[in-house]
Image: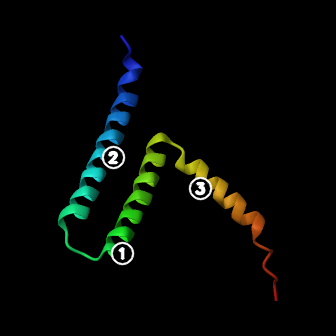
Amino acid sequence: MFPNLAAPIRRVIAVVMALIAVGVFLWLVDTYVPMAQSIKDILNIVVVIATCVFVLQAVGLWAGIVRLWDDVVARRLPPHPRS
């Protein structure tokens, strides 16, 4: 009935499954792996940032964000003086 709907649904299911897997992984590490809390905090931050990048790539927004960042950086940096 909706032949073009299968690919987007598959993509959404893959993103949801990845988010569940990342959540379970972080919970297992936080609960059962004995390490300093500061290291766990750093690991959690890195995994959350990587997961955000993955989700943005999956929905097609990552390229726009990178382009926006490049525009912001290009406007803020002074021109390099040539010697």
Label 2: how many Cα within 10 Å (few below 14, some 14–19, many 20+):
some
- Between 81 and 31, the residue placed more toward the observer is 31
Give percent across and percent down for residue 77: 75, 71
Mark positioned earlier in the residue sequence (3 or 2): 2
Give percent across and percent down for residue 61: 54, 45
Query: Given the image, on which type of amino acid does mark 3 rest?
Result: Val
Label 1: how many Cα within 10 Å (few below 14, some 14–19, many 20+):
few
Query: Given the image, on which type of amino acid does mark 1 rest?
Result: Ser
Question: Does dot 1 land on a helix, a strand or a loop?
Answer: helix
Does residue 53 lie above or below 44 as drawn?
above
Left/right placement of residue 70 relative to residue 4 reads right
Give percent across and percent down for residue 13: 32, 35
Query: Given the image, on which type of amino acid does mark 2 rest?
Result: Leu
Question: Does dot 3 land on a helix, a strand or a loop?
Answer: helix
Q: Quadrant of residue 45?
A: bottom left
Q: Nearer the viewer, mark 3 or mark 2?
A: 2
Q: How is the image coloured?
A: rainbow
The residue drawn where x is 28% and y is 58% is: 26
Q: Residue furthest bottom?
A: 83
- Between 12 and 19, the residue placed more toward the observer is 19
Residue that badge 1 annotates:
38
- Between 41 and 7, the residue placed more toward the observer is 41
Question: Does dot 2 land on a helix, a strand or a loop?
Answer: helix
Mark positioned earlier in the residue sequence (3 or 1): 1
Residue that badge 2 annotates:
19
Q: Quadrant of residue 9?
A: top left
Give percent across and percent down for residue 59: 47, 40
Residue that badge 3 annotates:
66
Mark positioned earlier in the residue sequence (1 or 2): 2
